[in-house]
Image: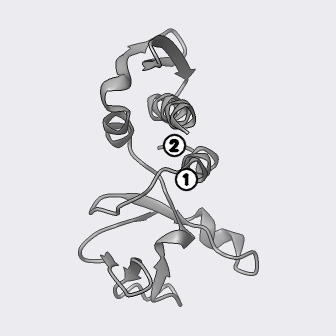
């Protein structure tokens, strides 16, 4: 799983999340809410957390979560934590390879005709760094 910091950087770079069952996320709430609430990782699931359209935008509805005094949260108040396969899919045609190094994973992507490697001990994080660079290049 990618770090919250990388997930925030991807969101801030313009990555748009369309929640689907199985997606993981954390809350990104105003500073007056306990920081502990933001540390929890939630999973979109038809039984516990649904995505519901509203006139003002989609919300994540917490169905029957008794430990929360929270019924729903706007998508804008959530930070998507994409999985490795989702990050690879988002790279699309720019993705060239994933390689295991001695102490890291290397993801190679094509950025404007130049192949660039991105290394990290976690493969998902390497994919995320490559995606961040790809989004930055397209802006």
Of residues 94 and 82, the one nearer the viewer is: 94
The residue under the point 55% across, 19% down is 119
Q: In the visual, does 85 lie left or right of 74?
A: left
Q: Which residue is mark 2?
A: 2
**Rendered position, 120 above or below 84:** above
The answer to whether residue 27 is seen in the rendering is yes
Are there few (<14), some (14-19), or many (20+) residues within 10 Å of tag 2?
A: many
Q: Position of residue 52 (x, y in %)?
A: 32, 80
Q: In the visual, does 47 lie left or right of 117?
A: left
**Which badge, 2 or 1, is on the more N-terminal residue?**
2
**Rendered position, 26 above or below 87:** below
From this viewpoint, which residue is outermost toward the right? 32
Name the image quarter holding residue 113.
Answer: top left
Q: Position of residue 49 (x, y in %)?
A: 34, 75
The residue under the point 58% across, 47% down is 13
Q: Secondary structure at mark 1?
A: helix
Are there few (<14), some (14-19), or many (20+) residues within 10 Å of tag 1?
A: some
Q: Position of residue 12 (x, y in %)?
A: 60, 52
Q: Position of residue 68 (x, y in %)?
A: 51, 85
Distance Cα–Cα, label 2 vs label 1: 13 Å
Q: Nearer the viewer, mark 2 or mark 1?
A: 1
Q: Which residue is mark 1?
A: 11
Of residues 107 and 12, the one nearer the viewer is: 12
The residue under the point 50% across, 31% down is 134
């Amino acid at each position: 799983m990618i770090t919250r910091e990388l997930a925030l950087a991807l969101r801030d770079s313009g990555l748009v999340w369309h929640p689907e069952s199985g997606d993981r996320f954390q809350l990104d709430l105003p500073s007056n809410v306990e920081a502990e609430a933001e540390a929890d990782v939630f999973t979109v699931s038809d039984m516990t957390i649904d995505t519901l359209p509203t006139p003002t935008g989609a919300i994540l509805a917490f169905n029957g979560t008794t430990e929360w005094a929270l019924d729903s949260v706007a998508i804008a108040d959530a930070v998507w934590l994409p999985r490795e396969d989702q990050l690879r899919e988002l790279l699309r045609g720019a993705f060239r390879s994933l390689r295991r190094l001695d102490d890291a994973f290397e993801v190679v992507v094509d950025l404007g005709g130049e192949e660039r490697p991105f290394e990290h001990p976690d493969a998902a994080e390497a994919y995320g760094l490559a995606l961040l660079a790809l989004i930055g290049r397209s802006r």
